[in-house]
Each structure stands twice: as structure tokens, then as C-alpha cells.
Image (spheres, grey):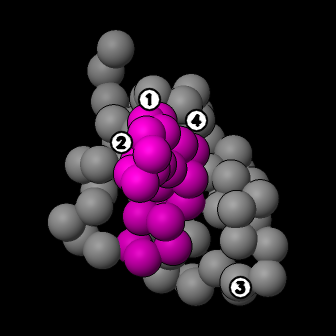
Amino acid sequence: MFDHPGLRVAAASPAHIFAMKALAARTRDIDDLRVLADIIGVQSAGEALQICADFYPDEPLPERSAAVLRELFDEQRADPV
């Protein structure tokens, strides 16, 4: 993001932050996951699970994380447009 002699600033992509928050599956991250899913265009739990696998291929996804993602996208589908 910014590179200057003696100072380099980097930021994770929205997809990477989504994967980190999904893996953590903390209650306080649910709203962030919704916003990030919208930003990166994730529309299903399957897509969300694939993003996690892409960023963390050697890290098994905890069942809690998978359940949070399934619930998150089930809720979104049930919301009126």
C-alpha cells in the first residue's frame, strides 16, 4: 500500500481478512463477515468455505467456523430484498 525508504505499510485483502475472521468464528466478527462478503461478492457458504481453503490450505476448518458460515448465508438468503 505504501513504500518509502525505511517504511513499508501493507494491508491484507478483503478476501484474506474474510478468511481470517471466518476461521476465528468469533461472535464479534459476524457483522464484519457480512460486510466483507458483500465487498468480495460471496453469496454462499460454499464460496466462503472455498475462500478459507484457498488462504489456509493446510489448516482444517473448525466445525464452529463452518457452522457460522452456513448460518450467516442461510440468514442472508432469508432476508427480504
Instruction: Name which residue type carries label 2.
Output: Arg
**Residue 79 picture location, percent across and down:** 32, 30
| Left or right for 38, reference 15 | left
Instruction: Name which residue type carries label 1.
Output: Asp
| Left or right for 53, reference 22 | right
For mark 1, what is the residue? 38
Callout 1: helix, strand or loop? helix
Residue farthest along the front direction in this orientation: 5
Instruction: Name which residue type carries label 3.
Output: Pro
**Residue 48 picture location, percent across and down:** 62, 51
Residue at position x 79%, y 82% in the image: 58
Q: Is residue 26 above or below residue 71?
A: below
Residue at position x 44%, y 29% in the image: 38
In the drawing, what numbered circle is on residue 77?
Answer: none
Q: CA distance from mark 3 to mark 2?
A: 22 Å
Closer to the chain start, of discs 4 and 2, is 2
**Residue 23 picture location, percent across and down:** 51, 73
| Left or right for 68, reference 63 | left
Query: Magenta part of the protein: which range?
Result: 1-25
For mark 3, what is the residue? 60
For mark 4, what is the residue? 42
Q: CA distance from mark 3 to mark 4?
A: 20 Å
Closer to the chain start, of discs 3 and 2, is 2
